Image (spheres, rainbow, N blue to C red):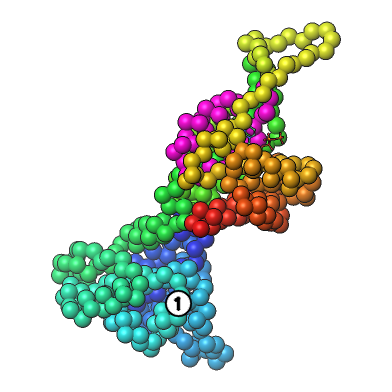
Amino acid sequence: MSVLRGKKVLLGITAGIAAYKIPFLVRLLVKEGAEVKVVMTPSAKDFVTPLTLSTVSKNDVHSSLVDEEDENAQWTNHVALGLWADLFIIAPATANTLSKMANGTADNLLLATYLSAKCPVFYAPAMDLDMYKHPSTKNNFNTLKEYGVLQIPAEDGELASGLLGKGRMAEPENIVSFLKEELEKNLPLKGKKVLVTAGPTYEAIDPVRFIGNHSSGKMGFAIAEKAADLGASVTLVSGPTYLQLAHDKVEIVQITSAKEMFEAVEARFSNSDIAIFSAAVADYRPKNTSTQKMKKKEGDLTLVLERTQDILGTMGAQKEENQYLVGFAMETENELENAKRKLEKKNLDLIVLNSLNDEGAGFKKDTNKITLIDSHNKVTAFGVKPKSEVAQDILEYIIQQTHA
Ligand code: CTP
């Protein structure tokens, strides 16, 4: 999933010839899942029309603080626009606008918005090569760098003047790649390896029958996807499920039985920073598995079951100081006490308690209701939420604890 998904991007257009490329940039950002609004300087309208931009962005385009031609004119709230944005990108950014940005001039809507924006600001310079090389432009670049404004470097090539050199606005594709790289660098789980278990296990009775459970894997998949969205490299060890992974940054290891899950987890656990075990692992399996399909006979059938390995408990015993281990507990009575006991016994850092008594919690549902208990005995209860938001709550808690 793109790091730009759901981001509110404010695009500021100034009067450079490269403005004709901005509708393509808007399309690319929208394709990445961003919401885009446009502000432009009045003279940028000579290079690209507000109609084109409002059509591709599906939002109103603003270019002046007050629309003087409209009798019911309202003031365009530059502060609200600045606050709305998660990212502000000024592209193309002319030498003139950059100079005003460096000096704090606010003589149009775009500049007033820039001065009041609290989000990260990027700019893609676009100018002729001699303007680009001019010492005053260099000074402005340096000043903006000091202010924390990030430059999307200009590219070499043919310029509008016909000259060859540096000063072309970065191509829209390169602007998008630059933004994605910058955002990915700052993700809270960047560089972390996260191991997640999900789904049921199937314990074979014979080649066609098994003992399983109703787990859908939805909670574990949501955790794996969210962890990847937050920058982690994720391995998801999953039992049989119909779910499809919606994230290309999650490696999936498919297993069937508790034994296979144990082996897959054991091989990867020591290499992980955070491990979250949400799988509904069978506690028992048939002691003997028939190699042929069992034929029915007169009378009752007794199956002898044996214990499976406790994956969570075994990894808890092996856990190193710098590893963070999370287990799930599904309880029907004495929920808090039982969950706390599990946390201690299995040497966990956090336990996620699902109560089957709660409306909106449990197997196969798209929602869940959890209570988190950490190793300091701190109890935090959450309301019923979609599983993707529950995943976010769990990961935010872990991030806050591991950065503490
Ligand atoms: N779990 C595991 N390996 C098993 C059984 C469970 O890793 N063989 C993990 C689950 O993924 C979950 C946690 O243990 O994170 C809790 O599972 P649960 O079945 O509720 O607890 P148990 O420890 O099996 O205890 P009890 O049966 O007494 O409730």
Residue drawn at the location 48% of the way across and 91% of the way down: 68
| Range of magenta residues | 257-285
Residue 106, visible in the rendered structure: yes
Secondary structure state at the residue bearing disc 1:
loop
Snapshot quadrant of residue 116: bottom left
Tell me if residue 91 comes above or below residue 389 in the rendering.
below
Pinpoint residue 396: horizontal percent, then vertical percent: 56, 56
Residue at the spot x=51%, y=49% of the render?
Answer: 227
For badge 1, the amino acid type reads Ala
Residue 161 lies in the magenta-colored region? no
Crowdedness near tag 1: few (<14), some (14–19) or many (≥20) residues, C-alpha within 10 Å: many
Which one is in front, 110 or 20? 110
In the shown orientation, is residue 109 left or right of residue 350?
Answer: left
Instruction: Tell whether position 261 is magenta.
Output: yes
Residue to which mark 1 is pinned: 117
Q: Quadrant of residue 185?
A: bottom left
Q: Residue at x 25, y 66 (%)?
A: 154
Q: Is mark 1 within 8 Å of ligand 1?
A: no
Q: What x and y, as percent, mark residue 119?
A: 45, 71
State whether residue 351 is above or below residue 401: above
For this orientation, the residue located farthest to the right is 299
Give left or right: position of 102 versus 112: left
Q: Is residue 247 visible?
A: no
Q: In the figure, is residue 72 to the left or right of 403?
A: right
Left or right of 295? Residue 245 is left
Q: Quadrant of ligand 1?
A: top right
